[in-house]
Image (cartoon, grey):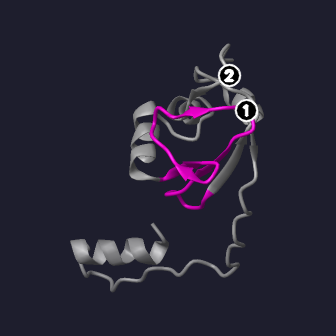
Amino acid sequence: MSESGSVRVDVWLWSVRIYKSRSLATAACKAGHVRVNGAGIKPSSPIRVGDRVTVTGGPRPRILVAQKLLAKRVGAPIAAEAYLDESPPLPPREERPAPVALRERGAGRPTKRDRRALDRLRGH
């Protein structure tokens, strides 16, 4: 826990496990994917308890309210206590089965174009 009243936003995002590395958190801040209290910020901007951090650029936007200030990376259970997640819920998944990719027998190895089409079909 930080003794001062603030921590760098990129360090906090890394320490609460939103990003896998501090350099990824810094890059996201520079790219404008992170906002604190609605304002665009630099990676060195301070964050305080109660600040609302919005992280975009992933599969869904994340809205986090800082509860604790952490300057070091911690385990997942402790990291989950450091913020309040106010993100909207994920949209429901469609319940239909995934389509099966069919190829004619003996057609040989798929081309790069075929592999990309199969990946799109499988949702990768």
Amino acid carrying mark 2 in the image? Gly
Between residues 96 and 101, which one lies in front from this camera angle?
A: 96
Q: Secondary structure at mark 1?
A: loop
Residue ID at (53%, 81%): 99
Residue ID at (63%, 25%): 6
Residue ID at (58%, 20%): 72
Determine contact: label 1, label 2, CB under 8 Å: yes
Q: In the rendered image, which quarter is residue 69 located in?
A: top right
Q: Mark 2 = which residue?
A: 5
Vertical placement of residue 99 versus 70, above or below: below
User: Crowding at label 1, few (<14), some or many (≥20) Cα neighbours within 10 Å?
Assistant: some
Amino acid carrying mark 1 in the image? Val
Q: Secondary structure at mark 2?
A: loop
Residue occupying the far bottom of the picture: 104
Between residues 107 and 41, which one lies in front from this camera angle?
A: 41
C-alpha distance separating marks 1 and 2: 8 Å
Measuring from the top left, give residue 114's x and y in whole percent: 28, 77
Q: Mark 1 = which residue?
A: 49
Q: Quadrant of the N terminus?
A: top right
